[in-house]
Amino acid sequence: MSDWRNTTHDWAGTVDTAHLEAIRAARAEVAPGGVRHLVLEVLAYAADEAESRGGGTAVVTRHADGSISVTDDGRGTDTRVDAAGRTVKKPVMATKDLRFFDHPAAATLPDGCPRRGMSVVAALSEWLVHTNRRVNGSWTQRYEHGVPVTGLTPIPDDGTTGTTVHFLPTLCGPVDLDGLAFGPHLTVVLR
């Protein structure tokens, strides 16, 4: 893994507990606007994927238990096989996004606040389930407060590709998801 190119995340580690704790300590700063900001953080990855493919769709669903899921139709989270033959996914949930976190010129989200990355969503959720569908296999993994509590669990392919991030936020306050939009390449559907 040391020879894998780091573009958005450092492949050398899977969990940065100090980073996750720092997010929880600065929740008002890293997630201004509460749950809406968390949804925008997830949609930012779907928008990146949609832009690279010329278009895409993300479905945002509010569930009865207060959880939210975001499902996109992209390629799925980058997954590779290491020298020992183990499947390794890009550590997007539990490590810093090298492009944005703590970067003074970070891109802004549609709410006008800086983009920080998926680790903000994972750290500020009681639980998060990351389901990934790629042409070379599908899996799911569960996190609690940003820390993985399961390994990559294979799931049957269903003929699609994309990512679902389903999370129960720990943030309090009203949840306004009306009018979500994210650039010209991503169509957002609210359910």
Image: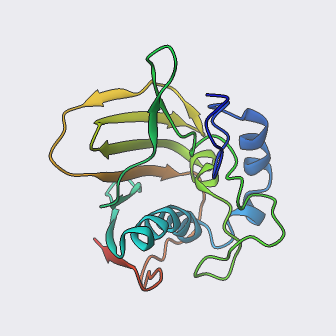
Return the x and y of residue 133 as percentages of the image width and height.
30, 45
Q: Is residue 165 above or below residue 108?
A: above
Q: Is residue 185 left or right of residue 37?
A: left
Q: Quadrant of the C terminus?
A: bottom left
- The outermost residue toward the top is 84
Residue at x 30%, y 61% (from the top left corner): 73
Residue at x 69%, y 76% (from the top left corner): 113
Return the x and y of residue 121 as percentages of the image width and height.
58, 53
- The outermost residue toward the right is 104
Q: Quadrant of the N terminus?
A: top right
- What colouring method underlies this structural image? rainbow
Q: Is residue 170 above or below residue 144?
A: below
Q: How many marks?
A: 0
- The outermost residue toward the left is 159
Return the x and y of residue 94 as percentages of the image width and height.
62, 40
Residue at x 32%, y 58% (from the top left corner): 63
Q: Is residue 135 above or below residue 34?
A: above
Asked which quadrant contains residue 74, the reply is bottom left
Residue at x 52%, y 18% (from the top left corner): 83
Q: Is residue 151 left or right of residue 125?
A: left
Return the x and y of residue 179 as percentages of the image width and height.
42, 86
Asked which quadrant contains residue 103, the reply is bottom right
Nearer to the camera, 126 or 180: 180
